[in-house]
Image (spheres, rainbow, N blue to C red):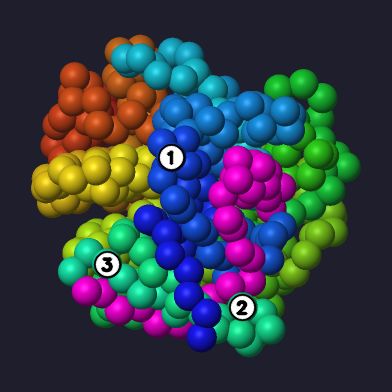
Amino acid sequence: MSKEFVDVLVIGAGPSGCVSSSYLKNNNVSVKVVEKTKFPRLVVGESLIPRVMDHFEEAGLFPALDKMGFEKKLGARFLRGDEVCIFDFSNKFGEGWDWTWQVPRADFDNTLAQEVINKGIDLEFETEVIDIKFDGTDSITTVRNKDGETKEIHAKFVIDSSGYGRVLPRLLDLEKPSKLSPHSAIFSHVNDINREPGEEGTLISFDIIETEVWLWVIPFSNGNTSLGIVGPTEYIDKLSENGDTTEALRKAISLSEYYVKRFGNVDFLFEPKHLKDYSCSVKSLFGDGFALTGNASEFLDPVFSSGMAFATESGMLAAKLALRQLNGEKIDWQREYTDYILYGVDVFTTYVKEWYTGNLQELFFHQPENPDVKKKICAVLAGYVWNKDNPFVRKHDTVIKNLANLIKLEKEEQQNQA
């Protein structure tokens, strides 16, 4: 069996793996990337948030992405019947990027991977990890390519950015259930032939069908649009008695008074995909000689598009800490990695939970708007969930619930007076 020797092995060539490997290459680290699939490939997670732009810029990947002309995302719109709430990323609390992209991930991820290759990084597609053994922080990873050939990759550190493949969590028995209740999604793309001109045609929107059920609409610059329905798994399963995803997504679109005319009779570009019980977690984000990043560690919910932000945040941080460790520093992975990443996860978990309780929706649609509150929530939605100067980050576990209760009490008093 052939052998290769590198400083860092990165498993997965998605955004997290590309950020990690690019940063390490920029710092003269010997790095290899293995990716199980062939690019371009279909994947969900098409709506980004501004925090990811910091990571693409720092990793030196931004110019290649910017040349692609992806649809700019300046904010997001939430609809509930006749009620509308629009967040503008340029009007948020604190510093940070004012825009990002909404992207067909097949093109986006392929652009990232090709830029990584252009940097001189050894990236092998259609190469699967089948075993790994650790000796302290050193590891021997056995991989198999599409021709069935196996080889060993000897590395001083491993970054698992395998996403839903969750390679190390499976091999090392690190998986555990999510703290969130079971939700599922069904999505596809359409050629958006009824797209209206101007902002209406390109604005990303979330149409609330019921408190826990919502439709996403993500227009791309290529004329296509991503459509998806999200809700409790039991609800999603009932959209089609025989599990027909096309029937289920058609029914979901018919429930949207706002979008049924635009999308009701448009053909899907591929059979809608069903993501069942998508939330997941792990027992540990690191171990001797490895770190888990992105969806290989934790995935919450697509409602606020936090997935890629955690992927690139953790990918960048894991690469920086691995570099320091390779240079002889003793790293406190619990404090510098796990505690940091999980703080942001906890903030977003609160927002996801309070979205599905309806409390956050009360704040979104309350009239008249409170501009100060909206700015601080907008910063969270932009992904700046580690900025503790923002009380909606620092007090995330209480502030939403308390404000929602005040709004409900105010409504009750108004009804009683009427």
Which image quadrant is residue 67 in? top right
Q: Amino acid at mark 3?
A: Asp
Gap in Å between the C-alphas at discs 3 and 1? 19 Å
Q: Is residue 125 magenta?
A: yes
- For the C terminus, the quadrant is top left
Q: Helix or strand or loop: what does disc 1 sit on?
A: loop
Mark whose residue sits in front, 1 or 2: 1
Q: Residues within 10 Å of mark 3 (few under 14, many from 20)?
A: some
Tell me the residue that label 3 is attached to.
Answer: 138
Q: Where in the figure is residue 206, as x and y percent of width and height?
A: 55, 41
Does 50 appear above or below 181?
A: above
Gap in Å between the C-alphas at discs 1 and 2? 27 Å
Q: Is residue 132 left or right of residue 230?
A: left
The residue at the far right in this view is 193
Q: Where in the figure is residue 221, as x and y percent of width and height?
A: 76, 34
Mark whose residue sits in front, 2 or 3: 3
Viewer-side residue, 287 vs 162:
287
Q: Where in the figure is residue 282, as x and y percent of width and height?
A: 26, 66
Q: Which residue is pictured at 79% across the width and 52% down the height?
A: 190
Tell me the residue that label 2 is attached to.
Answer: 145
Q: Amino acid at mark 2?
A: Asn
Q: Which residues are magenta?
A: 106-135
Q: Is residue 262 left or right of residue 310?
A: right
Tell me if I can see residue 84 in this picture: no
Which image quadrant is residue 154 in? bottom left
Tell me the residue that label 1 is attached to.
Answer: 28
Q: Which residue is pictured at 47% across the width and 35% down the height?
A: 26
